[in-house]
Image (cartoon, grey):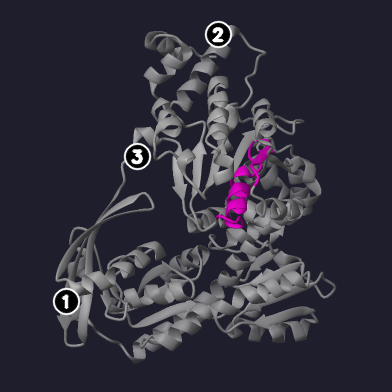
Amino acid sequence: MDGNYRVLGIAPFEGMKSLMSALAEEYPQMDLTLLVGDLEQGLEIARSNFHGDYDVVISRGGTAKMLKQNLPLPVVEIPVSTYDLLCTLKLAGISAQAQKAAMVSFDNITANARMLCDLMGYDIDIRTVNCAEEVEPALAALRAEHYETVLCDAVANAAAKRLGLNSFLITSGADSVCQAFERAMALCRSQARLREENLFFRELLHGQIGQTMVFEESGELFLSTLDNPSPDLLELLRRELPESQREGERRITWNLGGMLYSIRSRQISSGSGRHTAFFFVARRSPLSPSQAGIRFITRPEAEAAYCDSIFSFAASLSDLQEDIARISGSGAPVLVTGEDGTGKESVVSLLYIHGPLRRNPLISVNCSLLNDKSWTFLLEHHNSPLADESSTLYFASIDALPGERRRQLLAALTEMDVCRRNRVIFSCVCQPGEYTSAAGSLFMDRLCCLSLFLPPLRSMAEKIPALVNRSLSHLNADLPRQLVGADPEAMALLQSFHWPHNYTQFRRVVGELAVVAAGQMISGDDVRRILRKERHMGAFSPRAENASAPLDLNRTLEQISRDVAVRVLEETGGNQTAAAKRLGISRTTLWRLLQKKD
């Protein structure tokens, strides 16, 4: 957009970014750059984009408050209106006679909330925080006091999920965003600023190959061509600062999060002092065939994966929290069982995050992805995870291993005393009506594992309304409009559905309903249309945790053979040679099988 005023918008969550982007089209005179970041992350983003010749910054809540205190540019705050608060109260199901509820946020949100509660007679415990460090203690206190519902801004909402609280995100609607845009335009008209020289150099840097980040002598980020540099990358470069400041120029190679960074550092002097510039190119690290199916996961990566999963807000509904807390403190091997899609990966992440070895990596071995080379690496190489110590080893989908490999793995675990030197967790997929599989029973008996069974979603139909509302609250952070719930008919249909793929299927269905719903409420017709499609999905629909759907044996041998060939081809990643080898047939025979139609 070619506008007269350059505005930097820092949204605390994705949904607000989408809403701001849509409404910005009504302001052709505004050239809006939108980024996502909360509190310190938002401030870091603003500082790294300071040389973008912006006239004003727009943000919300605690992030706006922090930006006002630390930026020389004017900051316009997106308000949380009375209507915005009422929408959140509606979604949370809070009324004058509601359950015990609380709110945790900064004063620029809680001030309006106090007036609204006084006016409407809501009994809500409103607690104001002044910095990010106060958020988690405030939420922990509410959990200790047994509050049922907590209304939060973006940073408190993320912390509430980690603590297992029933949280609802306070969002700002279209009217509030437009009000902020009008104020920003008024500011721009009164103090239009031009930074043509800085803009020229910024465009020059963006045109080069690779990326640039410049740090002050104190370690503060001065300039970045990355819109939103990751915390891990910032930490890596800051660790290199002392050595780089002592030398004129250095070359560094780092492997971080599956990316290979080729970095060159150089000292730059200016009138305001010395700066350290890092010029780098990032490319994805090649995956060694000998390590296929084996991943090293850091604690921040595990926390991010858990917080993004549906289990982060479904755990408190499943009556598993006490069992998970008890098992987390134990060093004994653990077997996590459950049907397809019941959240085994999420529970394993939670056991790791709260376990005694959380400062060391989580090593995930996906048994369904191990090829011959990675199997040999696992059992024989000196760098094998089995030779590690004081780590958490997770063997996912042990039922995907052939019988001989199961016995080999059990022998290696026993002979190498792996379970004594590490925390070892297994998972297996069981069928409806089972508590574990044959493979799970074998490992549990041989290694004296603690067991954790994850019940299917259909056994908790009475909790689906609460799960729907929490899911919608989570989705509101990524949607340009606010959803406030589902009508009674829609909820009844969701409760009566069988949910063969459990939470995985539930999250996908609710996500689709959030997109197709015409208004702010999901209707019965919306649910009926989506569930009709779910009931007719075939055996080869995407499934979680590498579980295989049962074959329909009520067909001809030719049809069953073709389905087996398709399934094996999918499991080998489309490699026809590998699929034919597993099936014990030639590639020509496999091709003929695949050409046959039902």
Q: Residues within 10 Å of mark 3 (few under 14, many from 20)?
A: few
**Mark seen at residue 287:** 3
Q: Nearer the viewer, mark 2 or mark 3?
A: 3
For the point 24% across and 70% down, the residue is 243
> Front-most of 275 and 82?
275
Q: Is residue 350 magenta?
A: yes
The residue beneath circle 2 is 558
Q: Is residue 173 magenta?
A: no
> Front-most of 39 and 33?
39
**Amino acid, disc 3:** Leu
Image-based side of 47 in relation to 296, left or right? left
**Mark seen at residue 268:** 1
Q: How far apart in space, not on screen, are marks 2 and 3 (Cα)? A: 38 Å
Most extreme residue toward the bottom is: 190
The answer, for residue 179, to whether it is visible in the render is: no
Image-based side of 217 in relation to 427, left or right? left
For the point 51% across and 66% down, the residue is 13
**Amino acid, disc 1:** Ile
Asked whether disc 1 touches disc 3, contact meaning CB atoms under 8 Å apart, the reply is: no
